[in-house]
Image: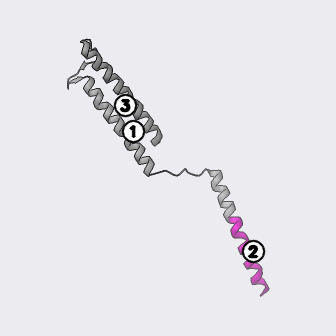
Amino acid sequence: MGKYVTVGSYWLGSLSAALALFARGLDLFGTNFIDFNTKGGGIGYHSLMNATIFFYMISIATAVYTGFNPQKREASLEEEFESSVREQSQIAPQYAMSDTTQSRT
């Protein structure tokens, strides 16, 4: 799951950076149509750059976390069955030997 979060946040950060650079370029020519005015304030290239930093930080933090905390793959039912059969086959001869030795004495 960490891999998907890392890749997704990386691409969202890259998209935000591209939009911010595009908006800043349009702002140089005075034709910026990306600025949106809302009740709380405008959404412009600076907001997009903040989003870029936010998504890149999520990507880096997730990559570091998954690098230091590797998750072991859960065994399937078939693998669990095979390991239990293997364990029982190793234990069974020991009990069989002990039963025969006790009956002889």
Marked residue nearer the N-terminal end (1 or 2): 1
Task: Give the residue number, with chain letter if any, for mark 2.
Answer: 96
Q: How is the image coloured?
A: one colour
Q: Nearer the viewer, residue 38 or 100?
A: 38
Q: Position of residue 49 (x, y in %)?
A: 29, 29
Task: Give the residue number, with chain letter if any, for mark 1.
Answer: 59
Task: Give the residue number, with chain letter if any, for mark 3.
Answer: 13
Q: Amino acid at mark 3?
A: Gly
Q: Is residue 35 left or right of residue 77?
A: left
Residue 91 sits in which quadrant? bottom right
Q: Nearer the viewer, residue 102 or 11?
A: 11
Q: Amino acid at mark 2?
A: Ala
Q: Position of residue 59 (x, y in %)?
A: 39, 39
Residue occupying the point 27% across, 23% down = 45
Q: Amino acid at mark 1?
A: Ser
Marked residue nearer the N-terminal end (3 or 1): 3
Residue occupying the point 73% across, 79% down = 98
Marked residue nearer the N-terminal end (3 or 2): 3
User: Alpha carbon of mark 1 to alpha carbon of mark 2: how far?
Assistant: 57 Å
Q: Position of residue 87 (x, y in %)?
A: 66, 64
Check the image and report above or below for 33 versus 42: above
Residue 90 among those drawn in magenta: yes
- Magenta segment: 88-105
For mark 3, give the secondary structure: helix
User: Alpha carbon of mark 3 to alpha carbon of mark 1: how far?
Assistant: 9 Å
Quadrant in the picture for the C terminus: bottom right
Asked whether disc 3 touches disc 1, contact meaning CB atoms under 8 Å apart, the reply is yes
Asked whether disc 1 touches disc 2, contact meaning CB atoms under 8 Å apart, the reply is no
